[in-house]
Image: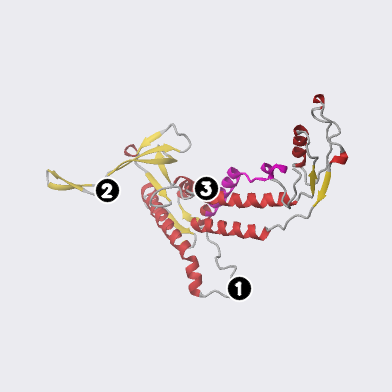
Amino acid sequence: MNDWNGTIKKEMFDLSQVESNYETFTNLTKKYLLNCLVGNAHLTGEGTLLEYFDEIIEEAIERGKIAIIEVGKQKLLAIPKLIQQTLLKEKVEGEKGSEPIEPVISYEFTLLENSNLTYQSKDLTKWVIFKFNKEATPILKGLSFWTKRLVNILTQMEKEIFMNEKGIMVTLPQWPDDADVSLIMKSFSKKPFFFMCLPKSQEGDKGKLGIAPHQIKTEFYEPKEFHEEKYRSQFAFVWTNMERAYGIRHDTLENKEERASVSEVFSSQANFDAQEKKIYRLLWKSIREYNRIFEEGKGNYNFKFGRIGG
């Protein structure tokens, strides 16, 4: 309690009040990445798919896959679940000799807006599944790996800012009463500048005399250097790599002082090009399938994802 070595003891501060909320930060980051990916998908032209497309993309990002089905005359979004799949054509003996049997793919669809309603693909005449990757897994899977590191950096920075706001160190008598010390420390942790004495003890009924003003010594100190640039650099490094992992384009050469060569520019964008090509091909295939199944080829669509397509 009476020691002073240039570092304020942790128990003097209620650091919980400055810790970043992990859940809130993760939700906000997820929303940002989701908006970036939805914004990359541009569908133009003429056809009924335009009405549902943004919601389809958003659900496909979050869930890995989403289906649009027709029930009656309604087009509804549904969560697909693979029930049966045979990959290769099989040949069986029939009346006309050996005949191939087409691969069987069977799905169960659960309505997005009503999880109590399910439909079997064999009972539907029109349905198309949209995916963001071949595995049909949520594209933002693993986000916690990044947000845990980002929140840790923010928390460390906030703690350092908070610690540097403390301008006075309170030194108590050699043997103060525990109840009195507890009250002082609790109050001290809430304010950047604080001075307090307790002429009357919190346990006066036990014969305690409290802490008189002359028994309290205040010691001013100069806050230690705040390494803001260090934290900003760490945060930017993790954030940039997170964006890169999810295919969010950014200028990776923006901090280069000299003019980047053409090969450097191409190399820095190759990762984004590859991811966008994969997503574009999967979505464009589903768009064309929708046009064939739901609109008998009468729709007219142009699709672009990021810089791919047109």
The residues colored magenta run 10-36
Disc 2 target residue: 87
The disc, 1 or 3, on the residue closer to the chain's N-terminal end is: 3
Camera-side residue: 269 or 67? 269
Q: Position of residue 98 (x, y in %)?
A: 13, 48
Amino acid carrying label 3: it is Ser
Local secondary structure at mark 3: helix
Pick the front one: 175 or 231:
175
Look at the magenta stretch and give its main secondary structure.
helix
The Cα–Cα distance between marks 1 and 3, rounded to whole angstroms, is 34 Å
Tell me, for residue 144, which label it has, or none: 3
Neighbour tally class for label 2: few under 14, some 14-19, many 20 plus, Cα within 10 Å: few
- Label 2 vs label 1, nearer the camera: 1
Residue 173 drawn at (x, y percent): 81, 40
Neighbour tally class for label 1: few under 14, some 14-19, many 20 plus, Cα within 10 Å:
few
Marks 3, 2: nearer the viewer: 3
Q: Is residue 206 magenta?
A: no
Left-right relation of 205 to 41: right
Distance of label 2 from label 1 (alpha carbons): 54 Å
Q: Tell whether 248 sits left or right of 14.
A: left
> Residue 243, how many percent across, how many down?
53, 57
Identify the mark at residue 139; answer none if there is no mark: none
| Above or below: residue 232 compared with residue 70 | below
**Callout 2: SS:** loop
The N terminus, quarter of image:
top right
The residue tagged 1 is 257
Q: Quadrant of residue 66?
A: top left
Please name the residue shown 12% across and 43% down the image: 95
Q: Are marks 3 and 2 in contact (CB under 8 Å)?
A: no
Seen in the picture, residue 7 relative to 17 is either above or below; the reply is below
**How dense is the environment of label 3, judged by Cα within 10 Å: few (below 14), some, or many (20 and up)?**
some
- The colour scheme used here is secondary structure
